[in-house]
Amino acid sequence: MPRPPRSKKEIALEKEKIMKMAVELINDEGFEQFNMRKLGKRLGIAAKTIYNYYKNKDELYLTILANGFQELLDQCIIASKKISNPIDQLIAMGKAYIEFGITQSHYYNLMFTWNVPKYNDYANTSLENLARVELNTSLALFERFITIIRKAKPDICDEDASFYVIFFWSVVHGYISGYNNTLLNYMHHDPLSIKERIMETMITHIRKEFFSLEGKS
């Protein structure tokens, strides 16, 4: 008797299982060495089974990125949506970002650290639309920070608003990367204990800079 078709929930769970194992494999061996055969071996299934869920490794990879950016965006929104003060919103989002980067380090490495394919690598290919979904989701996170910075200082010009998001990201990304690769262990006895101080110091600096931008357009 043939097996009944899988439910949507079963299919979603299987796809999630494949994605999680793929993230581990890519982090262990690199994107160039990643393939469906190796993934199938880790999953204990035939590689051809994976193709029932994803057309190829690039589709799987782009789906992983899109899901990762959506999860990070959702966590930042949840952390800040009940806060009215924009500076406190930035702090809350920064903490959520750091938490994601540390607790979901394999995803974070793919999203921000490793030299892996980006949107332009898929332009004018059959995967361009999927790559655009990933790009738009990542940019939505950038725009979320831009929006809150403008709430903190409504007259800030576009160039300065973008600069502060880049500055903000550079600081937290540097901290996350240093923590994940254990480099900070050589600089501090407990690098995790200073994450809030890093956030507060950075926000204090940005707050002071806001006041120096009066009249700038």
Image (cartoon, helix red, strand yellow):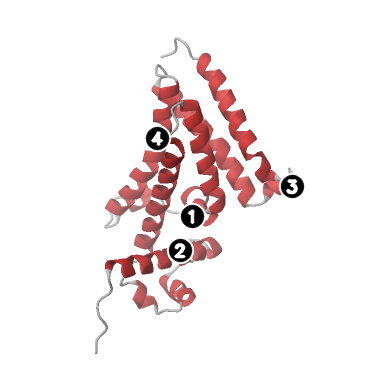
Amino acid type shown at disc 3 = Tyr
**Residue 142 point in image, percent of width and height:** 41, 37
Nearer-N-terminus badge (1/3) = 1
Q: Residue at x 55, y 42 (%)?
A: 173
Dot 2: what SS? helix
Q: Give the residue at mark 4.
A: 144
Residue 20 got which mark?
2
Return the residue found at the far bottom: 1
Residue 30 seen by the camera? yes
Return the residue found at the far top: 215
Dot 4: what SS? helix
**Residue 137 point in image, percent of width and height:** 36, 45
Amino acid type shown at disc 4 = Arg
Residue 55 seen by the camera? no
Dot 1: what SS? helix
Amino acid type shown at disc 1 = Tyr
